[in-house]
């Protein structure tokens, strides 16, 4: 195979998982690095678990991450359709081919019969493998079963395929990430490739699609390794070229268990809603298994693509460190252009009336509050005091700061002196410095003086630069709040 063609093949039974995003990224990077094609295929054969909302979420999330596909359900391509449910008429032909070649057979076992086999295996403490009861049914026996109203499923004959293409029962392949992997295929059991209702199973549909879409490299999670052995045998049974496979380690939570909802967000869209930037997310997931050669971790997807080598991906599991993602996100927020940041913050400021601020005031508010943001959503709780006439005072701020004699004195004096001040940052800076100095002479620490003003105006004991806050709010609002704080 000359052209590199890789794919991401999500099943739309949920929103795009962060782990799937990493698999998509590594496929995308591999395609980019090799001037190949990156293909999106929707594997929606499980109709009960599929929903259009999940399909839309997968599209939107991949796009938001910048992982644009060359061929896919929406953009089409030479080997479409790219949605499995639209390909149902393609599969029967290949089932027939396998039946004709003797690599598949009809199985008339009922669910009850199969359940009994499984129970028997459990009783004997043996791993369950289908008994092959139906492998050698005669035409007469099959007709009899059909006459009983039984509809056959089709099973793949593992042993036959193994025998036809390999010596012994051991199947080996050279994994792009993990090196040589092998399995005793006699442990696999003849699995169903087409159910009695005519719908193909994952292991079969995926091979037919990868074959027809000329996929050259299959890069996916290591949870698929046992499937890969089954799939290799199907490729061989169909006389098709077997793609190269690469299996990525799993992504684990910091407690080493499977990453799940109880650890925090898991879907890309959840991370985005929480205020993570997609640039930070994609940079972060790239580092789950891949390390930059120059040790410089902050990188764009294009920079990563230049440095990316599939053989250098770590074959072990990666730990999803939320703290590291948070650090990375805060870094990306710091790097954002102010106008861009102003726009991105707006959804998180929906509960405030932004029209209270001029554009210049809004700009300044963002400038003085952006520094500590880890998530874009942190802005919501960082800025309430920039809006409305009154301000909510934290109870502790009331008792520990505003109620003290010193504070009450500071506030009264502030009202008296600030009457003549111009409320620009420059002027306020100078005036407040002098104001603090007066109190310092009386033995009051500058920070105590400022606490009083901050508490009255913002309701808090810490926050953004005080001169900027006063200038943005303006004299009228500041006076109103200070008066309210005086007993
Ligand atoms: N639909 C499968 C999944 O979401 C795809 C696996 C594969 O890449 O073959 O796990």
Image (tube, rainbow, N blue to C red):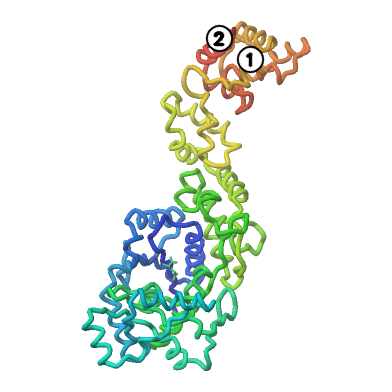
In percent of width and height, residue 451 lies at 66, 19
Q: Residue at x 53, y 92 (%)?
A: 168
Q: Is residue 1 visible?
A: no
Q: Which is nearer the N-term, disc 1 or disc 2?
A: 1
Q: Residue at x 50, y 86 (%)?
A: 186
Q: Residue at x 69, y 16 (%)?
A: 449
Under circle 1, the secondary element is: helix
Residue denoted by label 2:
483
In percent of width and height, residue 211 lies at 38, 79
| Number of marks drawn | 2
Q: Residue at x 63, y 24 (%)?
A: 461
> Which residue is nearer to you in this view: 92 or 289?
92
Q: Quadrant of the C terminus?
A: top right
> Which residue is nearer to you in this view: 199 or 352?
199
Q: Residues within 10 Å of mark 2 (few under 14, many from 20)?
A: some
- Dividing the picture into quadrants, the one containing residue 448 is top right
In percent of width and height, residue 213 lies at 37, 75
């Amino acid at each position: 195979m000359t052209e590199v063609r890789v794919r991401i093949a999500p099943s739309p039974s949920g929103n795009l998982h962060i782990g799937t995003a990493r698999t998509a990224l590594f496929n995308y990077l591999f395609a980019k690095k090799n001037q190949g094609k990156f293909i999106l295929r929707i594997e929606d054969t499980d109709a009960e678990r599929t929903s259009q909302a999940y399909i839309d979420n997968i599209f939107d999330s991949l796009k938001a991450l910048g992982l644009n596909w060359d061929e896919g359900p929406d953009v089409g391509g030479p080997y479409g359709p790219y949605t499995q449910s639209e390909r149902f008429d393609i599969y029967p032909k290949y089932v027939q081919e396998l039946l004709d070649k003797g690599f598949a057979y009809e199985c008339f076992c009922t669910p009850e019969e199969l359940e009994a086999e499984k129970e028997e295996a459990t009783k004997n403490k043996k791993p369950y493998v289908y008994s092959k009861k139906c492998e050698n049914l005669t035409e007469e026996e099959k007709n009899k079963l059909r006459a009983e109203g039984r509809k056959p499923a089709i099973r793949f004959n593992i042993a036959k395929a193994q025998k036809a293409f390999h010596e012994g029962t051991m199947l080996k392949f050279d994994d792009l990430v993990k090196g040589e992997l092998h399995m005793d295929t006699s442990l696999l059991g003849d699995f169903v490739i087409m159910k009695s209702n005519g719908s193909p199973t994952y292991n079969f549909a995926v091979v037919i699609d990868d074959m027809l879409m000329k996929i050259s490299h299959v890069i996916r999670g290591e949870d698929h390794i046992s499937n890969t052995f089954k799939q290799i045998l199907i490729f061989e049974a169909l006389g098709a070229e077997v793609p190269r496979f690469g299996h990525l380690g799993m992504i684990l939570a910091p407690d080493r268990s499977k990453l799940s909802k109880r650890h925090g967000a898991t879907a890309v869209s959840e991370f985005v809603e929480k205020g993570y930037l997609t640039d930070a997310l994609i940079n972060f997931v790239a580092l789950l298994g891949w390390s930059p050669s120059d040790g410089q971790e902050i990188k764009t997807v294009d920079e990563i693509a230049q440095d990316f080598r599939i053989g250098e991906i770590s074959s072990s599991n990666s730990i999803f460190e939320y703290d590291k993602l948070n650090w990375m996100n805060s870094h990306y927020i710091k790097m954002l252009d102010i106008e861009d940041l102003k726009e991105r913050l707006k959804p998180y400021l929906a509960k405030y009336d932004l029209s209270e601020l001029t554009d210049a005031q809004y700009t300044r508010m963002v400038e003085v509050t952006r520094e500590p943001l880890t998530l874009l959503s942190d802005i919501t709780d960082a800025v309430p005091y920039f809006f409305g006439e009154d301000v909510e005072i934290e109870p502790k701020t009331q008792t520990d700061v505003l109620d003290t004699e010193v504070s009450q004195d500071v506030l009264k004096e502030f009202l008296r002196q600030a009457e003549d001040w111009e409320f620009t940052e420059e002027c306020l800076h100078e005036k407040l410095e002098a104001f603090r100095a007066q109190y310092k002479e009386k033995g009051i620490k500058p920070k105590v003086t400022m606490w009083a003003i901050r508490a009255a105006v913002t309701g808090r004991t810490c926050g953004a630069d005080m001169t900027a806050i006063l200038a943005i709010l303006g004299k009228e609002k500041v006076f109103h709040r200070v008066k309210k704080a005086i007993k």
